Image (cartoon, rainbow, N blue to C red):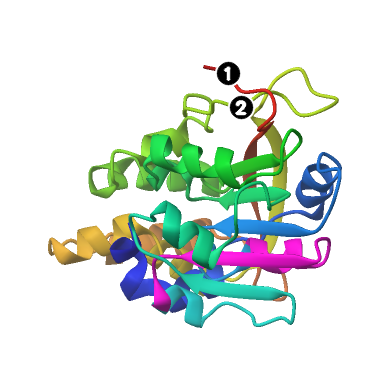
Amino acid sequence: MANLFLKQAKQYSKTRPGYPQQLFDFIASKTPTHDVVWDVGTGSGQAAVSLASIYKSVIGTDTSNTQLEFAPKLPNIRYECTSATLSMSELEQKIGKGSSIDLVTVAQALHWFDNDTFYNQVKCILKKPNGVIAAWCYTIPEIDDQFDPIFHKFYNESKPYWDSLRGLVDDKYTSIKFPFGPVDGCDHTGPFEFRSTKLMSLDEFFMYIKSWSAYQTAKEKGVELLNENVVNEFTKAWNEDENGQKSVTYPVYLRIGKVGELVN
């Protein structure tokens, strides 16, 4: 998974959407204490920064040193590069001992994991019985009635270059394995929908596309997804404001559960 994003780490850090404050407020309301968070697959730290404003300490881990180089450095965030196959001993050494973490978060990465192995680690490291795991993904952006049909057509044509696991994101994480019980105040584990909005120029939107793993895969196969015809079509449909920007909305889908109510 890390190799898919290795060549476009800079684009990823600059153009991927942030996540709405409402998302973090909702998650924080479900954790009784706000001491330590393990942000898994932290990438360039988009979620870690927001978590650091609520929790005393954030440990952001990723298998890519290149991604971590672009992560913001804050006093209460510690970044660690981990093995792709994280062992229990490495877990204890780099993240913490059993029952020591209030919250485990996974932003736009759960679909890449070996879920059985990862969930065993989560069950070990979360505080019992109310430690929380929160994992979310965002689907393709929404812009306006003129641009969206053109973009949807382009996205559908890009699907041969996506890893098959991308289907879990398209499915809004409804079908992903998630063996945890509902957090207090909820009768299910989601997905719960939030929305993230970002002002972008067309050049920034192109850079966002270039941060896709599918874009890099296509490039390696000699295919330019953003060919001249696509660029022209996008340009004609991009009705920007006076500042050259448009409002781009990313639907965000959250699965959230607690370790104390396990489902077999």
Which amino acid type corresponds to the residue marked 1 in the rendered image? Val
Q: Classify mark 1: helix, strand or loop.
A: loop
Q: Identify the residue at image location x=40%, y=57%.
A: 233
Q: Distance between the residues labelled 1 and 2?
A: 6 Å
Q: Give the range drawn in magenta.
A: 47-65
| Circle 2 Cα neighbour tier, 10 Å, few/some/many (<14 / 14–19 / ≥20) | many
Please, is residue 118 above or below residue 209 in the view? above
Q: Does the magenta stretch include residue 97?
A: no
Is residue 143 in view?
no
What is the quadrant of residue 128 in the picture? top right
What is the quadrant of residue 145 in the picture? top right
Q: Earlier in the sequence, mark 1 or mark 2?
A: 2
Q: Classify mark 2: helix, strand or loop.
A: loop
Which amino acid type corresponds to the residue marked 2 in the rendered image? Phe
CB within 8 Å, label 1 to label 2? yes
Q: Identify the residue at image location x=74%, y=61%.
A: 51
Is residue 201 in view?
yes
**Disc 1 target residue:** 263
Coordinates of residue 15 in the picture (x, y in percent):
54, 69
**Count of residue discs:** 2
Q: Identify the residue at image location x=38%, y=46%.
A: 112
Furthest residue toward left: 222
Q: Which of 184 and 157 is in front in this view?
A: 184
**Disc 2 target residue:** 180
Please, is residue 180 above or below residue 2 in the view? above
Coordinates of residue 113 in the picture (x, y in percent):
40, 45
Q: Quadrant of the N terminus?
A: bottom left
Q: Is residue 49 magenta?
A: yes
Q: Is residue 236 left or right of residue 31?
A: left
| Circle 1 Cα neighbour tier, 10 Å, few/some/many (<14 / 14–19 / ≥20) | few
